[in-house]
Image (spheres, rainbow, N blue to C red):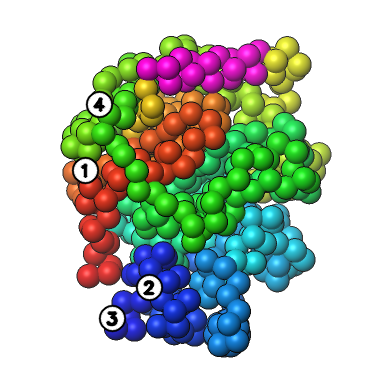
Amino acid sequence: MSFDDLPDLSATELSRRIAARDVSCREVMQAALARIDALNPRFNAIVSLRDPAQLLAEAGERDAELARGERRGWMHGFPLAVKDLSHAAGLPTSMGSPLSPRSPARTDSLHVARMRAAGAVVIGKTNTPEFGLGSHTYNPVFGITRNAYDPARSAGGSSGGAAVALALGMLPVADGSDMMGSLRNPAAFNNVIGMRPSRGRVPGDPEQELFFQQLGCEGPMGRTVEDTARLLAVQAGFDTRVPLSSPHPLPSPDALQLDGETRGLRIGWLGSVWPELPLAPGVRELGEQSLDTFRALGCEVEPCTLDVPREHNWSAWLRLRQLLVGGKLGAYLSDPKLFAQLKPEAQWEIEQSRHLDAASLYQASLYRSNVYRAFLKLFERFDFVVAPTAQVFPFDAELHWPTEVNGVKSDTYHRWMEIVTPFTLAGLPTLNVRAGFGEGGLPMGLQLAGPIHADLDVLRLGHAYDQACGWGARRPSALA
């Protein structure tokens, strides 16, 4: 293998070669920096890149550790760029906002600390929308991140920089976060893998609010399901400072096994989840074609519906999201000058949150509970459920968000991502796998979900599907 091909190795294979000292950490870093230098100016996935000389020196230190028989973990020597909503010590956390402090973070976020402890070398950050709002990665600090398969199109978001960096081989794996599909949508838009784990699987920030924040979570992204699973094993694990974190342990990354029997597994095809939910032409068709791959694996596939009113799901989503976003950003409302500098979508969330009362929030929680119960009912019949990851294909990167879907006007800035919300509300482990490419060569994905805490089962079926579908072999033209 040539030096130039190192960034295209799977993370699992790269980890094995580094551990065996078939390739040095310094060579891996050099190859990653060369790929970033060649492609990042066009796609703008990685921001706040650290000094290359310092990064090469740190990679050399990882090599010296291996020479002494010391291996930190599965990510030993991996270049890592952290999503710019999370803290990485020594780098600013811009959150895509000019209002964020420019001083370097003093400590790592919890999941970042775990990746660093596993041997990763933090090289910079990955771009995100302002405060992570909206599934399209652009902001006034760093600009637009462009789709790996068509730079005129959106990369999705809010983990758009992470997804593009993965697709183009700038990183072997990447962290992201997900409230409204932010680990799933950009993975679908860039033909990579992203997983929203079960609620609590990856602990959140122990310094933030600990009990109401149950929609957003951190999680893994990769170019293969196997890589994604191993990164999840690094990130996951109970932390006593985060009381709602999951006590169910995962195997270590090196011990993780994803091979398993697929014959006889029952899969429910949700389609658009609700009959009236609009999908762009071609989205449903790609999903239905993908079902043939599950059938070829011996799975039994049947159509199904989620027995909860769409308006109840959306009502719960709006109010609970407004509670969390408005609570976090609401302080800006007291300073008109600062408030005016926020993106309109952030202003809207804050303003809407001021109309919430205890009765409406309790009703939202009841509706959310009904969403979970509706999935429980489905899991009496099915082992897994599947739906499209997005309602639209990657759109014009210069747009802020799609104003309509298949002729249906969007009444909010995020209505076009409604299809991800029931999985978030229910807290289910949900994996984006590849569905193929639509007209114009634009990628799309499928949400593969299982019961709460069945993360490994979801990953095992996703692994079998991804190996069988073959879509991972279709690389961006920039890598040709």
Q: Are marks 2 and 3 in contact (CB under 8 Å)?
A: no
Q: Secondary structure at mark 4?
A: strand
Q: Which residues are magenta?
A: 363-381
Type of the residue with mark 2: Pro
Residue at (37%, 17%) from the top-left corner? 381
Residues 430 and 467: in front is: 467
Magenta residues, dominant SS class: helix
What residue does disc 3 label? 1
Quadrant for the C terminus, please: bottom left
Few, some or many residues within 10 Å of mark 4 (<14, 14–19, 20+)? some
Q: Of 185 and 246, which appears nearest the observer? A: 246
Q: Earlier in the sequence, mark 4 or mark 1?
A: 4
Amino acid type, label 4: Glu
Q: Secondary structure at mark 2?
A: helix
Numbered circle sitting on residue 7: 2
Answer left or right for 157 relative to 223: right
Give the spatial CA distance, label 2 vs label 3: 11 Å
Q: Residue at x 28, y 81 (%)?
A: 1
Q: Nearer the viewer, mark 3 or mark 4?
A: 4
Say which mark, if any, is on residue 300: 4
Q: Residues within 10 Å of mark 2 (few under 14, many from 20)?
A: many
Judged left or right of residue 109, residue 177 is: left
Q: Which mark is residue 438?
A: 1
How far apart are the alpha carbons under marks 2 and 1?
A: 27 Å
Does the magenta run of residues contain 378? yes
Whether 472 is among the magenta residues is no
| Position of residue 225 measured from the top left corner of the image (x, y, whole percent) | 38, 51
